[in-house]
Amino acid sequence: MSMTKLNRHLKMEHLNDEYLTCKSCSKKFRNRKAISKHIYLLHESGDYHCDQNGCDFFTTYRGNLITHKQSKHLRKKCEFNGCDRYLTLTYYPRHIRLHQNVRSYHCSWPECGKSFIDNTSLKDHIRVHLNFKRFRCKWPDCHYACEQKTNLITHIRIRHFKLPHTKKRQQELNIPMDTFPNPNDYVETINEDISLSYNNI
């Protein structure tokens, strides 16, 4: 696919997306130019191809192929007795901390005392204290906000599109999937720095 065709596809298919997501590696981009360049350089050109079954990852750079394999395909067996899980090298250290119950990230909210295995989990927890809603509905005159994107998608489907709760039920009722806009077009993601909000309390 040429850059021109790729840009045309992105304009037609992703015009209203808040973030553009690469379908090959799930990396997110804010504009079409950046994702076009990324796809062209990493996935549609180059001499390095992932040799895993069913994977069509291509890249110009050997280092990108190594990173791709480590994060998507290479797995390591958990060494703890009784645990038979195989994990990507990216997730493996976090999984081990779960077994060891190492919780180095502590909530300093008054009288809370909870601790977590990583900073991401701590930030998710702090959002509860702050009553911070990460996702908001962009439907006109709707003020719904929530912490989980899946809850917002469900809200949009039921409240605004008047659809059944699940896509499966929608299919059972023979309601065509393509007659409604993409619910993601009505999702606003709030990217507030939790640490700044938390420190100002």
Image (cartoon, helix red, strand yellow):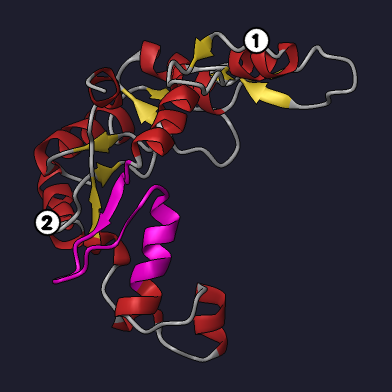
Give the numbered dot on residue 11: 2
Q: Is residue 126 left or right of residue 141?
A: right
**Helix, strand or loop under label 1:** loop
Identify the amino acid type marked 1: Val
Identify the amino acid type marked 2: Lys
In which quadrant of the rendered view does residue 73 lie?
top right
Which residue is at the front of the view, 173 or 4?
A: 173
- In the rendered structure, which disc, 1 or 2, sits on the residue that comes first in sequence? 2
In which quadrant of the rendered view does residue 27 lie?
top left
Q: Residue at x 68, y 19 (%)?
A: 98
Q: Position of residue 140 (x, y in %)?
A: 14, 71
Per the image, is 153 magenta? yes
Q: Which residue, as the protein is rendered here, is positioned at the far front? A: 111
Q: Residue at x 31, y 44 (%)?
A: 134
Q: Is residue 185 left or right of residue 55?
A: left
Q: Which residues are magenta?
A: 132-156
Disc 1 designates what residue? Answer: 102
Q: Position of residue 85 (x, y in %)?
A: 76, 27
